[in-house]
Image: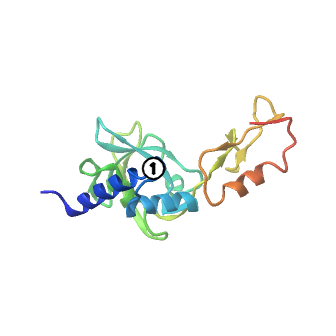
Amino acid sequence: DVDYRQLYENAMHGMAEGLDPYSAYISADEYQRLQEELDQEFGGIGIFVDFNPETKRIVVLSPLFDTPAARAGVRAGDVILAIDGKDTATMSYRDAVQLIRGLPGEPVRLTVLHVGDEKPVDLVIQRAIIPIESVLGDARRADGGWDFQLQSDPRLTYARVINFGENTVEELRKTLPARKCQALI
């Protein structure tokens, strides 16, 4: 037996890919993620996560600066053992991300094992609107903003455009006018 939805998704992918090298079918879930990327914001707690195939657990790569996760004490390398009481060992990466994300103002409870600790802790974190920066600098300043001048050579301005979205042009504009530099990377 083949699930009807899976059959539909596969048929749509096949039809779109057969049109030309630039066409693709985007499912409803994929469209939601694409829209969040273009809008450069989503409802969540502000962490980058990855799936560890050996332990079958979700691992925090990094909390984003000044987000609910960072303020709650989530650190890089933390292992997320459960989300709202559901064991992450039995869920997919996609399901875990969907459970962590949600409406701003709603809480999510993470059971986290900090690196070097033996006992997990429960963290209740209030979701918020998480902005997605698309223009990054060389290093973070103490206030959380980016330093766009290279520390090794202040004559050089360094701006990394990591994705394109609704605010990318404005973000880039803000980095350039105040800079007196001899070169832009």
Q: Which residue lies furthest to the top in this view?
A: 152
Q: Is residue 86 shown to the viewer in this render?
A: yes
Q: Quadrant of the C terminus?
A: top right
Q: Residue at x 73, y 38 (%)?
A: 158
Amino acid at circle 1: Asp
Q: Name the residue under label 1.
A: 20
- Name the side, left or right, on which 61 lies relative to 99: right
- Name the side, left or right, on which 148 lies relative to 136: right
106 versus 171 height, above or below:
below
Q: Which residue is drawn at 34% across and 49% down?
A: 93
Residue 179: x, y in percent?
A: 84, 45
Q: Quadrant of the N terminus?
A: bottom left
Q: Which residue lies furthest to the left in this view?
A: 1
Q: Is residue 74 shown to the viewer in this render?
A: no
Residue 23: x, y in percent?
A: 46, 53
31 versus 147 height, above or below:
below
Q: Nearer the viewer, residue 40 or 54?
A: 40
Q: Nearer the viewer, residue 100 or 114?
A: 100
- Name the side, left or right, on which 134 lies relative to 42: right
Residue 54: x, y in percent?
A: 29, 35
Count of labels in the image = 1
Local SS, label 1: loop
Render colour scheme: rainbow
- Name the side, left or right, on which 44 lies relative to 162: left
Q: Which of 105 and 131 is in front in this view?
A: 131
Mark 1 burial class by Cα count in 10 Å: few <14, some 14-19, many 20+: few
Determine which quarter of the picture holds residue 168.
bottom right
Q: Which residue is drawn at 45% across and 69% down?
A: 103
